[in-house]
Amino acid sequence: MSALLVAEGLTKRFGGVAAVADCSFAVDEGSITALVGPNGSGKTTLFNLLTGYLTADRGSVSFAGRRVRRPDPTRLYRAGLTRTFQQARVFPQLTLVENLVVAIQQPWRAIGRRALGRADGERAHRLLEEFGLAALAGDRAGSLSYGQKKLLGFATVLMGEPRLVLLDEPAAGVNPVMIETIERHVRELHARGLTFLIVEHNMNLVMRLCDPVIVLDHGTKLAAGPPSEVQSDPRVLDAYLGS
Amino acid sequence: MHIVVQACILGLLTGGVYALMASGLTLVFGVMRVINVAQGALVILSAYLSYALFRHLHVDPFLSVLIVAPLMFALGVGVQLVFIRSLRSEQAEELSLLITWALALGIEGVLGAIYQTTYRATDPSYANSSWTVFGYQVSEVRAFAFALSVAILVLLYLLLAWTRFGRSVRATVQNPSSARLLGVDADRVRALAFGVGVSTAAAAGAVYGVLYPFNPGSHYDLISRLLSIVVLGGLGSVGGAVVSALLMGVVEAVVAVEISPVWASFSFFVVLIAILLVRPQGFFGAEERTL
Amino acid sequence: MSRITPHGLARAAVVFGLLAAYPFVVHADWLVNIGVFTLMYAGLASAWNLFSGYTGYISLGQAAFFGIGAYTLGITFNHVSIGSGYRPFYVLPLIGVAVAIVSVPIAWIALRTRAMTFAIVTLMLLFIVQQLAFNLRSLTHGSQGIAVPQPSFSSNFDRPYYLAMLGVLALAMLACWYVRSSKLGLMLLSVREDEEKARGVGVRVTGAKLIAFALSVALTAMLGGVWGYYLFYIYPESAIDPLVMIGAVLMTFLGGKGTLWGPMIGAFVLVPAQQWTLTTYGATRLYLIAYAAVFVVVLVLLPRGILPSLGELVESRRFRAPARPDVTPRPKRAVS
């Protein structure tokens, strides 16, 4: 398996604190990789660096074999790298269908066309059906429950036909039934060839779903490997339980 | 060269007064994310108050600060309580800009009704005298105005750094929700901070009338400069406002002598745009993207 | 998002039909004069809404481009003989396009800033352009102003200007409607809802904002051109007037920011009132207090504007079921 996403020596300081310090790792194509670590280990910052929401002080990110010189969320999305948000961000005043359709990549010449063309609308409806949200298609996204918003956020990024999806704490704040639903979708999409990088705190989910697991501590990679290995690594236990 | 240094001196002295006005403007933004477009109008209002006190009661303009500033502080608190607090929070930032603009219009209207559009100036006996220091002319009033501005800015600094209120203000600027969790009464802080912001305008306004002739419409010129200054310094940063006010004052004065007085006020905008191209957040503003 | 419905088409036809008939039916000059300004503000408000209503970025610089449009007409007049009568009206689209092109780099600089700074920077644009109008004497004749040759419309002098304003207004409404129902509109709304997320799902936000801004400027400049021709004399203070800006903004808020017909409604309510106040109180500047008062009332009591508030009133009567605790009672249609 080749590496789809490679981070080399990423460093980001805020004031005097290095949130991410010389962090290097790789995400193989076709894997469901987990990114875990105790609080303050730099997961969120790293996520933002990878997806272009923050600029690294040093280091580089390569996607699909090409170095990404100035990571920018829009360009990365169009190149096939996309992310969800931990807080289940949706476009509240737009309907579910509109939420999805806006995420379809358009060439400039198409912006004058009707907002909800037939093909786009059908695609959106199919995706909504897959995620069990079809009944609410015409409702405003702001009226959804938190868990439904998370599903919508997940569905939205799929509209861009990505190769790599970064999930930002998909299980945070949702009930166990919803977690199972999300897990099921991840597995299905993975079977269809999608690569995932998941930041998560829910260890049960991580151990079930992901392989390999990358552990961060103090902004740098501590360990990486299959879940069983990482679970019994003394350094990892130290990081989580230590001072 | 002599002329340029002379201009720099003039610019610094003027910049000091602008710094005072701008500090209040940027402080209010920092605390409650409100752009007080009426700051210029409040300066002019204070100028008129001071003018009236001088004309009718022969109160020296610099002394009138002691009367005008507390009055305007109360006005500021009142305005915040009545108009700004009642804005619903989802659109509060944009609406506050429009409401304070409305306030400025209202002030202009009232002053226009009372005083019409003739230009006024407060002219105490020392208005035109100057000293000669090392061969350079230093206008007395400008020196006093500068000294007053410095004194009040120092007071402002002490207020922010040493008092409990000041700590509450700084906490609210840095992180409003945490500040609230720690017991800071956000409403009270906002109202008082707005009052402080307005009273800096008042102090400056009291002496503004001695420096420049003014009429009710003068606030547009003023607010355009003040906005350039606070954006350049970084919205919310009092230090930034002071630095950029001094800088702008000097640039304007130098342009006036070296190029032409007509383009002098335009230099404010040129400097601002030049810096914004390179650094959209101004000198000391926070970086743009937050997640 | 709306499509061409017979209902909507009929509504537009009726409104614009009535408006077109107005100057032929009404004979008093002063009434047509008020009509000219009402339509002008309606156009300004719609043009403003096209950018600020749909993106959520409050731009306070449109008045600058209004003035630039007026000056462009005046300067062109003085250098190139366009002829008089109706010909200057045909130059309007060119003016609109030219000013829009000029505005793109300016907008690009301004859009590099955050929302509040953007509002301030655009406000400064107003002051900057006014200063330039005063200072670039060779071009604009400074405070003396530029004279535009009087046309030789015999009777019904105001009528051609009224129709010209109506034409630009129709164009503005068309543009607003079209953008709203197009993919561009969806992009702009996503920017308004959550710009960072929009970036994250591949929406090219900068380009979308620039296009909307340019369209808004083109329309505003055309209105400025008609206005300049109407008044024959273009001065810096009147051509680039903060009050015009704030008026357009207020009308949009009153009618409903982000709605299609809201800005027009706001203008039709406020402009006649404004003209009346001006004639009654103009000399004493008291009209400013009236502006201020209306502003405060609208912003504090009716911040969402007439149309959305009416819409909510109607919908809340339609759905009589008690609201679910986590759902705000809003119409289920898409954003209007």
Image: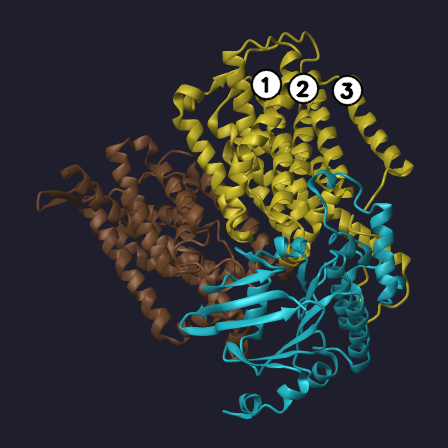
Residue that label 3 marks: C26
Chain ID, mark 2: C
At numbered mark 1, what does the secondary structure look like: helix, strand or loop?
helix
Instruction: Tell which of C195 and C28 is nearer to you.
Output: C195
Could you tell me if residue C23 is visible in this image? Answer: yes
Residue that label 2 marks: C161
Chain ID, mark 3: C
Tell me residue C42's x, y (percent). 69, 34
Vertical side of B174 occupied by C238: above or below: above
Q: Which quarter of the picture shows residue A182? A: bottom right
- Side (left or right) of B7 relative to B206: left
Check whether the beta carbons of the residues at disc 2 and disc 3 lie within 8 A of each other.
Answer: no
| Amino acid type indicated by mark 1 | Tyr
Task: Report the Cα–Cα distance between label 2 and label 3.
Answer: 15 Å
- Side (left or right) of C332 relative to C282: right
At numbered mark 2, what does the secondary structure look like: helix, strand or loop?
helix
- The shade of chain B is brown
Task: Report the Cα–Cα distance between label 3 and label 1.
Answer: 22 Å
| Amino acid type indicated by mark 2 | Tyr
Instruction: Tell which of A216 and C259 is nearer to you.
Output: A216
